Amino acid sequence: MALNKTFQNKDGSTSNGYYRVREIHTQYEKDKDAVADLSATFFVEVYDEDAKQVITALYKFPSKGSDPAELPVKTWQLEGAGAFDLPLSDSEPVQNLTIKAYEYLKTLPEFDGATDC
């Protein structure tokens, strides 16, 4: 699954883009007697169908001899590419991953006799 749409290149020209979700990361945190905190982030990659290449952000790197702690600066980012937080109004998909993790743990010898609580 993906999305197609045109986009404006860094030089102002237009290209046909193929936008796809490349990665999805979920985070589940739960302290004892607390409500679970669920979150997800996903990353969108854009493929330029005209130039036949993945479009990446452009960075200006520190000059030679500059402070080693100085980080590169992003100078151009294609709109619609990059990281997004995924709203989780329904926690079921992430919850299923957690259930599967516990079911797997119970198959390991070091968890022999463990029960759900």
Image (tube, rainbow, N blue to C red):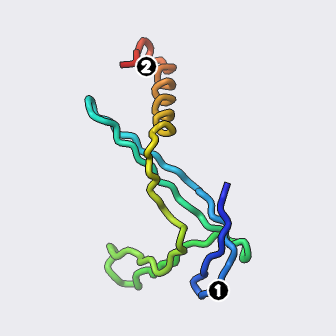
The residue under the point 51% across, 65% down is 82
Any mark on residue 13, and which?
1
Q: Nearer the viewer, mark 2 or mark 1?
A: 1
Residue 37 x, y percent position in the rendering: 35, 42
Question: Mark 2: which amino acid?
Answer: Glu
Find residue 86 and report its horizontal and vertical position in percent. 46, 53
Q: Which mark is residue 43?
A: none
Q: Secondary structure at mark 1?
A: loop
Answer whether labels 2 and 1 touch (C-beta < 8 Å). Answer: no
Question: Which residue corresponds to the image point at 72% horizontal and 77% vertical from the top-left?
Answer: 51
**Dot label at residue 110:** 2
Amino acid at pointer 1? Ser
Mark 1, other Cα within 10 Å: few <14 / some 14–19 / many ≥20: few
Element type where label 2 sits in the image: helix
Q: Position of residue 47 (x, y in %)?
A: 66, 68
Disc 2 crowd rating (10 Å Cα; few below 14, some 14-19, many 20+) is: few
Q: Quadrant of residue 3?
A: bottom right
Q: Answer above or below: position of 20 versus 30.
A: below
Using the numbered discs, state the Cα–Cα distance from disc 2 to disc 1 in whole angstroms. 60 Å
Q: Earlier in the sequence, mark 2 or mark 1?
A: 1
Where in the figure is residue 96, as x and y percent of width and height? 50, 33
Residue at image position (51%, 20%) is 107
Which residue is painted at 34% across and 37% down in the image? 36
Q: On the rendered structure, is 10 left or right of 5? A: left
Count how many numbered circles sit on residues in the image. Answer: 2
Looking at the image, residue 12 sits to the left or right of residue 95; the answer is: right
Relative to 76, residue 81 above or below: above
Q: Nearer the viewer, residue 15 or 47?
A: 15
Q: Is residue 50 left or right of residue 64?
A: right
